Amino acid sequence: MRIGIIGCGFIGQKRAKAARDAGHPVTLAADLDLARAEALVRSGDDTRATTRWRDLVESDKVDLVVVATTHDMLAPITLALAEASKHVLVEKPAGRTAAELEPIIAASGRTGAVIKVGFNHRFHPAFLKAREIVDSGVMGPLMFIRGRYGHGGRVGYEKEWRFVPEISGGGELIDQGSHLIDLSRWFLGDFTEVFGVTPNFFWDAPVEDNCFLTLQTAERQVAWLHATWTEWKNLFSFEIYGRTGKLHIEGLGGSYGTEKLTFHQMLPEMGPPETTSWEFPFADRSWNLEFEEFLAALAEGRRPIGDIHDAYANLDIVGKVYQGTKP
């Protein structure tokens, strides 16, 4: 497939590499910084860089487009691409509100465009192994999840676009919090009861730097989640509890530490569990695996793992928390 990239920053570059690793050329790239777009495309008769994202909507030289812009532009660009019958991999959260995704869902239904959302955490090896263990049934019915995710920002962080609500749609809840929500939905299903608080403890900004969530399914399974921009040593911890076992995922590589999965299997006599651990010290391949899954879904005519409907459910939860925490 011929790939287009809109937004050629850090994430756009990762997506371009994943496409090329899978043998698919990047034929057109758009960025407000033309030099950045030019750096992303490779020279050749069929490659081009532009500052106009609408060039990709109008082009007949792209089949699948990656959208990796600021949050305010994710939905309008994806909508235009869907209306042009182009498949899209749009970065999470796919928009600022669930309402922004409704016309995209309608357009994709009319044109057949498939919209995948960048929930790459599902494709980390520890999560893929955890999914395999849960699906095997050895943990019994799942009871609850406890997740924590955070970093400490950087000097001048409060002056960046993520702290401008008109652009970002919110703070840490819509940022790292949406990954925790997505992973929790992946294991527990839809949440029918939502409660959260979104305080600002440290950064001088109009959006929250922390979020604390309690989510419950119709079967009364619970996800208890905390995402923070005031985690002074980067942290990722995700625990899945079943009636007969527990899974603990720690680290995501890099500054979050070596990715590790630990499985504690309850014994019939209870007491200390039988423990098995796996470490994944190699480079992060979640971007490649997610791209390959999208291509497989297109080839097989099925829903991709982590699509626009998952993003809608995610943003619906985010919106309920924001609405409930307004003064």
Image (cartoon, rainbow, N blue to C red):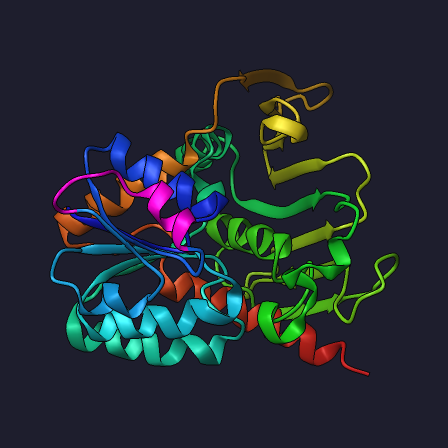
Residue 19 shown left or right of residue 34 in the figure: left
- Residue 3, x across and y down, in percent: 23, 49
Q: How many marks?
A: 0
Query: Would you identify the image quadrant in which residue 82 lies?
Result: bottom left
Q: Could you tell me residue 298's position as x and y percent?
A: 18, 51
Q: In percent of the image, x 25 and y 66: which residue is there?
A: 55
In this rendering, does residue 143 appear at all? Answer: yes
- Identify the residue at image location x=42%, y=48%: 36
Q: Is 69 or 308 nearer to us in this picture?
A: 69
Does residue 113 sit above or below 247 in this rendering?
below
> What's drawn in magenta, residue-wise?
34-46
Q: Position of residue 307 (x, y in %)?
A: 36, 58
Residue 241 % position (x, y): 62, 39
Of 154 and 45, the residue lying toward us: 45
Q: Which residue is found at the position 46% from the left and 36% from the top?
A: 134
In the rendered image, residue 76 lying in the magenta stretch gets the answer no
Q: In terms of depth relative to the viewer, which is nearer, 45 or 65?
A: 45
Question: Vertically, is 148 above or below 216?
Answer: above
Residue at far right of view? 201
Report the side of 318 relative to 118 (left or right): right
Residue at 36%, 62% in the rendered image:
51
Q: Report the quarter where the C terminus lies.
A: bottom right
As drawn, which residue projects farthest toward the front? 35
Q: Is residue 312 visible?
A: no
- Left or right of 120? Residue 267 is right
Q: Is residue 274 above or below residue 132?
A: above
